[in-house]
Image: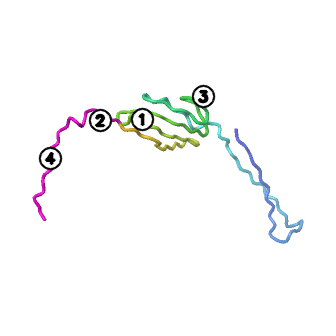
């Protein structure tokens, strides 16, 4: 479906007289946006997301613009919280919080040698 907009321009090259009034017909075509570009992704394997604009929205739903909070965990982070926003298909992200995973071994069991002593004396 196309929309047509017709503009009529009055051109008056000299002081306004009925003989100097010209009318030009200019036509523009605007195609309406019929397809929403922001399609919600599948839920992450180790997390989920909440759509701020529509709490009932889920994977595969399409919007012109949408914001969501994603929370996830992976091999590097116990928890990662990300704000995602999409407008006309362009996604942006801002990391709100990251909680790193703790090391899988206890540091107290590690033995460190004494630091070298300085032989320099004042």
Asked whether the beta carbons under mark 2 and mark 4 sit within 8 Å of each other, the answer is no
Residue, disc 4: 114
Query: Going by the picture, which residue comes out furthest to the bottom?
Result: 15
Earlier sequence position, callout 2 versus callout 4: 2
Q: Is 82 displayed left or right of 107 in the figure?
A: right
Secondary structure of residue under mark 3: loop
Which of pointers 4 and 1 lies earlier in the amino acid sequence? Answer: 1
The residue mark sitting in front, 2 or 4, is 4
Under circle 1, the secondary element is strand
Q: Residue at x 42, y 29 (%)?
A: 46
Mark 2 Cα within 10 Å, few/some/many (few <14, many 20+)? few
Nearer to us in this view, 71 or 113:
113
Residue 105 belongs to the span the image colors magenta: yes
Of tags 4 and 1, the one toward the viewer is 4
Image location of residue 23, percent across then percent down: 82, 59
Residue under numbered circle 1: 79
Q: Which residue is mark 3?
A: 56
Q: Quadrant of the C terminus?
A: bottom left
Q: Is residue 7 above or below residue 56?
A: below
Q: Is 110 left, or right, of 49 in this rendering?
A: left
Nearest the eye: 92 or 98: 98
Q: Count numbered badges in the picture.
A: 4
Give the CA distance from mark 2 to mark 3: 38 Å
Horizontal and vertical percent position of residue 102: 32, 35
- What secondary structure characterizes most of the magenta part? loop
Q: Bounds of the magenta span?
A: 101-122
Which residue is identified by label 2? 103
Q: CA distance from mark 3 to mark 4?
A: 60 Å
Q: Position of residue 106 (x, y in %)?
A: 25, 34
């Amino acid at each position: 479906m196309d929309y047509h907009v017709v503009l009529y321009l009055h051109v008056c090259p000299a002081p306004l007289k009925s003989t100097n009034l010209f009318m030009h017909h200019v036509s523009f075509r605007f195609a309406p946006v019929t397809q929403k570009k922001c399609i919600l992704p599948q839920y992450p394997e180790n997390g989920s997301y909440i759509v701020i604009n529509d709490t009932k929205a889920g994977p595969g739903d399409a919007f012109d613009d949408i914001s969501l909070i994603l929370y996830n965990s992976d091999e590097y982070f116990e928890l990662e919280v990300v704000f995602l926003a999409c407008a006309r298909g362009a996604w942006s992200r801002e990391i709100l919080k990251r909680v790193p995973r703790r090391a899988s071994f206890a540091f107290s069991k590690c033995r460190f040698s004494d630091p070298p002593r300085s032989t320099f004396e004042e």
